[in-house]
């Protein structure tokens, strides 16, 4: 239980800190409200869970030991994050366009696969916190479940924060400023991936 308690704290700090997921969840809550962001909220822990199962099954070793795979993942994630930052920054265009919709479950799950912060979180969680006294499969299931629960709560909190700001700030100019700030933060998170 000590490992799972430590994992819960690690998961809370990792999934609760600003990063690509949380900035997108905040922006979605801000732009579309909490109700329309639920699919994104649900897809985030599902994606993390799928990645964690994959890592626990041994694919994590491949990703971390083959430099070309790690580089490709980082590059693809960086390009996608910059694209999303651009879309957030041009929020007025997004509101009028047909593509102006929050991430669905599938896209939120897929986003985790190109999010380098999510990979680091999953790799660290599985490798450092799987209880040694339990069979590997049982320990892995406990770690994955703990991570998913904490990520779900963090995702909901970030989306709710954006939704609250949306209700409090009714001025279109203020929304625009917030969108640009979120876009800059998301673009800045790309820099962190390469440091």
Image: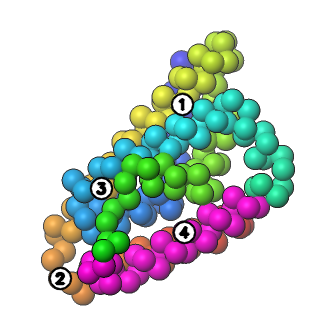
Callout 4 crowding tier (Cα within 10 Å): few <14, some 14–19, many ≥20: many
Q: Is residue 82 visible?
A: yes
Image quadrant assignment for residue 181 = bottom left
Assign a secondary structure to mark 2: loop
What is the x, y in percent for residue 26? 35, 62
- Vertical placement of 14 versus 174: above or below? above
- What residue is shown with label 4? 81
Q: Nearer the viewer, residue 11 or 148?
A: 148
Magenta stretch: give its range.
71-97
CA distance for labels 1 and 3: 23 Å
Disc with the residue nearer the chain's start (3 vs 4): 3
Q: Residue at x 30, y 79 (%)?
A: 97
Name the side, left or right, on which 141 lies relative to 37: right
From the viewer's perspective, is the residue at label 1 or at label 3 nearer?
A: 3
CA distance for labels 2 and 1: 42 Å
Assign a secondary structure to mark 1: helix
Assign a secondary structure to mark 3: helix
- Vertical placement of 31 versus 66: above or below? below
Q: Is residue 161 visible?
A: no
- What residue is shown with label 3? 37
Disc with the residue nearer the chain's start (1 vs 4): 4
Is residue 187 rendered magenta in the image?
no
Is residue 72 rendered magenta in the image?
yes
- What residue is shown with label 1? 144
- Vertical placement of 137 versus 66: above or below? above
Farthest bottom residue in view: 173
CA distance for labels 3 and 2: 21 Å
Tags 3 and 2 in contact by the CB under 8 Å rule?
A: no
Callout 2 crowding tier (Cα within 10 Å): few <14, some 14–19, many ≥20: few
């Amino acid at each position: 239980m000590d490992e799972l308690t430590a994992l819960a704290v690690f998961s809370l700090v990792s999934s609760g800190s600003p990063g690509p997921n949380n900035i997108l969840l905040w922006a979605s809550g801000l732009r579309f409200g909490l109700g329309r962001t639920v699919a994104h909220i649900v897809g985030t822990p599902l994606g993390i869970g799928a990645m964690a199962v994959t890592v626990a099954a041994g694919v994590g070793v491949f990703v971390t030991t083959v430099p070309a795979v790690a580089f490709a993942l980082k590059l693809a994630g960086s390009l996608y994050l910059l694209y999303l930052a651009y879309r957030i920054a041009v929020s007025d265009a997004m509101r009028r366009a047909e593509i102006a919709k929050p991430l669905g479950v599938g896209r939120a799950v897929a986003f985790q696969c190109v999010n380098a912060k999510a990979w680091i979180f999953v790799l660290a969680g599985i490798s450092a916190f799987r209880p040694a006294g339990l069979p590997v499969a049982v320990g892995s299931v406990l770690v994955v479940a703990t991570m998913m629960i904490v990520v779900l709560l963090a995702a909901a909190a970030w989306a709710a924060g954006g939704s609250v700001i949306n209700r409090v700030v009714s001025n279109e100019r203020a929304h625009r400023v917030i969108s640009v700030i979120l876009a800059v933060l998301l673009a800045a998170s790309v820099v962190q991936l390469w440091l």
